[in-house]
Amino acid sequence: MGTYRSLWVEIGCRKCGVVGPFDIQFKTGSDYLETYKAGEIVDDSSLSPEKVFAGCADYYCRPCFEAWRADDLDAQRRVIADMAREGIVEVFTMGKRLSPQEIEACRPSLPSGAIGIGSWLHACDLEVLSDGVPVFPRLRTSDAVGEDFDRRMEDAMRRRGWPHGDECFRFDLEVFVSPD
Ligand SMILES: [Zn+2]
């Protein structure tokens, strides 16, 4: 597994606007979880000035992230139930096909931080098929169904007031060392 470095900066949550410390993760190619604060003076050849590193961070503060996660899980259940109702997918658990109502009733308690439909499907031991082909994890033959799911999730999360839809990480940050 690749490691990374962290730069802690005070930025605003994209949902509630609260300003707090966010961990911007970036890679230089030789990283051992070094941690910096914005404005810190560094002496490290991997961090020479003029280099710019792509950084990623959470969009949301902790409480907003937890709210996003709960909404995301709820939206996943409803979207998959809708897709089952429309005959696009079939959902099975241990060989038994579930009705849309039964799909919506699958509400596991997930480990903290678990996101993505894989966590939900695994926790409830569900299989999602389209024309007999597993939809998750994504296979080439089910790309269209997966893209349909992504679009529905994006719409559902924006309707619920999440400014970045079904995405909770931002990849639009840059980290650099100024020469002075
Ligand atoms: Zn927030």
Image (cartoon, helix red, strand yellow):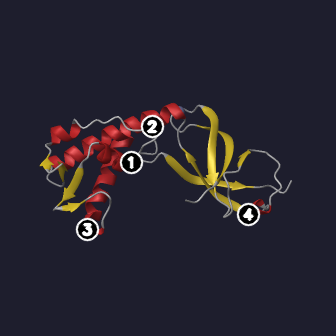
Kind of residue indicated by mark 1: Gly
On the picture, is 150 further left or further right than 26? left
The answer to whether residue 105 is seen in the rendering is yes
Q: Secondary structure at mark 3?
A: helix
Q: To which residue does mark 1 refer?
A: 116
Circle 2 residues within 10 Å: few <14, some 14–19, many ≥20: few
Task: Choose the circle earlier in sequence order: 3 or 1.
Answer: 1
- What residue appears at the point 27 percent right and 63 percent down from the top-left corner? 144
Question: Between residues 112 and 86, which one lies in front from this camera angle?
Answer: 112
Q: Are marks 2 and 3 in contact (CB under 8 Å)?
A: no
**Residue 141 - label:** 3
Could you say where residue 55 lies in the image, as x and y percent from the top left?
62, 54
Tell me which residue sits at (62%, 41%) in the image.
22
* Residue furthest front in the image: 94
Mark 3 to mark 1 CA distance (whole Å)? 20 Å
**Is disc 4's CB within 8 Å of ligand 1?**
no
Task: Name the residue beneath numbered marker 2.
Answer: 112
Comparing labels 1 and 2, the label whose residue is closer to the camera: 2
Q: Which amino acid is tagged 2?
A: Ser
CA distance separating discs 2 and 3: 32 Å
Q: CA distance from mark 4 to mark 3?
A: 41 Å
Q: Residue furthest right?
A: 180
- Closer to the camera in the image, 30 or 53: 30
Labels 4 and 3 touching (C-beta < 8 A): no
Q: Which residue is mark 4?
A: 51
Which amino acid, by three-letter code, is at mark 3? Thr
> Which residue type does callout 4 highlight?
Lys
Which of pointers 4 and 2 indicates the residue nearer the eye? Answer: 2
